[in-house]
Image (spheres, rainbow, N blue to C red):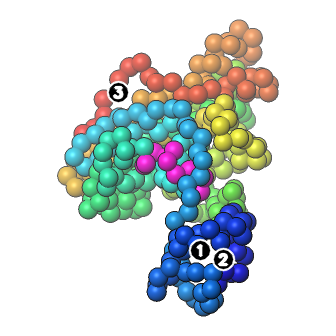
């Protein structure tokens, strides 16, 4: 069994790491701890607790938008994962909120990409989790996003994009392919200035990276996107130039109370005002966007000064 474990786990922990786990009886099968002398048995299930990675702190707060006996609605910042996965365990929205709010049964009703900021709904009690997760699964939630991307006057907007998106396991990027559409996004241009546009995106489906792929497919990739159209390497502690995508509004009928609910983010994408301040006197609205302009536009989120009422 040891040789098999070294083959499977050796890349991550090394042979010495596997030996240490066996010596400490940290790998367990159905009959108990596995030792270095245990025989290999095909089809055997094994369990072990891996060491937590050394995590880089994400230095941005989670804003509480709404809280009641059933739900906690928050504004998730850029660069913070929704749930523990891979290199991100403690520095995730779920772990932080469970700890800070003392809500051990808290669980997400849906997810946001680590790169995306904005509204995220958590369910307070495990018994109610299924009702809210089903609501999202069955497309019972109206989602509205905002994005900053280049402005192309040749695009006819509003426009509904439909395509087939495939995400393969173990591959970082999704892609569009031929076949029946399984993803749909309604795209509107709210305003344009200095070569950039402010867009409202309303997805009818929830495929991985759907909004990013659809905007890229229109020829206007979202500012700060590290994956589309090209992969851009970023260090885990590089918090500059976040993806300019915000989950701005969620609306639905509450499955427990039948009451209408509408939540609005208290965050805004600062790229729009940053470009406006810097270039309003220097760049005509439809001129191409320079690399310098895009770098200045890739700013962080700042809280709205006004308070937006939310459904309860």
Task: Where is residue 309? Give x, y as percent.
Answer: 30, 29
Secondary structure at badge 3 equals loop
Secondary structure at badge 2 equals helix
**Does the magenta portion include 94?**
yes
Residue 135 appears anywhere in the view: no
Secondary structure at badge 1 equals helix
Mark 3 highlights which residue? 308
Quadrant of the image containing the N terminus: bottom right
Magenta part, dominant SS: loop
Residues rendered magenta in the picture: 86-95
Q: Is residue 302 above or below residue 62?
A: above
Q: Quadrant of residue 174?
A: bottom right
Q: Nearer the viewer, residue 42 or 10?
A: 10
Task: Where is residue 277? Give x, y as percent.
Answer: 63, 12
Q: Quadrant of residue 290?
A: top right
Task: Where is residue 307? Give x, y as percent.
Answer: 35, 23
Q: Quadrant of residue 23?
A: bottom right
Point out the frontmost of discs 3 and 1.
Answer: 1
Q: Nearer the viewer, residue 29 or 259?
A: 29
- Badge 1: how crowded within 10 Å, few (<14), some, or many (20+)? some
Label ID, residue 161: none
Quadrant of the image containing the C terminus: top left
Label ID, residue 22: 1
In this rendering, would 307 be left or right of 163?
A: left
Label ID, residue 5: 2
């Amino acid at each position: 069994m040891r040789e098999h474990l070294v083959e499977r786990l050796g890349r991550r922990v090394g042979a010495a790491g596997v030996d240490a786990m066996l010596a400490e009886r940290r790998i367990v099968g159905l009959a108990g701890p596995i030792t270095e002398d245990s025989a290999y048995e095909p089809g055997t299930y094994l369990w072990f607790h891996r060491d937590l990675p050394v995590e880089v702190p994400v230095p941005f707060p989670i804003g509480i938008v709404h809280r009641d006996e059933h739900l906690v609605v928050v504004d998730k910042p850029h660069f913070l994962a929704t749930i523990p996965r891979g290199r991100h365990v403690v520095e995730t929205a779920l772990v932080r909120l469970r700890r800070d709010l003392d809500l051990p049964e808290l669980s997400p009703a849906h997810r946001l990409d680590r790169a995306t900021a904005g509204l995220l709904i958590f369910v307070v009690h495990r018994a109610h989790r299924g009702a809210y997760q089903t609501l999202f699964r069955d497309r019972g939630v109206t989602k509205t996003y905002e994005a900053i991307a280049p402005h192309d006057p040749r695009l006819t907007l509003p426009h509904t994009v439909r395509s087939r998106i495939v995400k393969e396991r173990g591959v970082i990027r999704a892609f569009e392919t031929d076949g029946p559409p399984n993803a749909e996004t309604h795209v509107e241009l709210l305003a344009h200035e200095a070569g950039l546009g402010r867009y409202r995106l309303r997805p009818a489906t929830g495929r991985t990276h759907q909004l990013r792929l659809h905007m890229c497919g229109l020829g206007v990739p979202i500012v700060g996107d590290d994956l589309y159209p090209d992969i851009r390497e970023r260090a885990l502690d590089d918090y500059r130039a976040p993806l300019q995508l915000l989950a701005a509004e969620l609306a639905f009928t509450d499955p427990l109370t039948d009451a209408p609910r509408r939540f609005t983010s208290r965050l805004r994408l600062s790229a729009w005002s940053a470009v406006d301040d810097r270039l309003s006197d220097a760049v005509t609205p439809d001129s191409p966007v320079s690399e310098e302009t895009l770098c200045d536009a890739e700013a962080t989120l700042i809280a709205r000064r006004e308070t937006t009422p939310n459904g309860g």
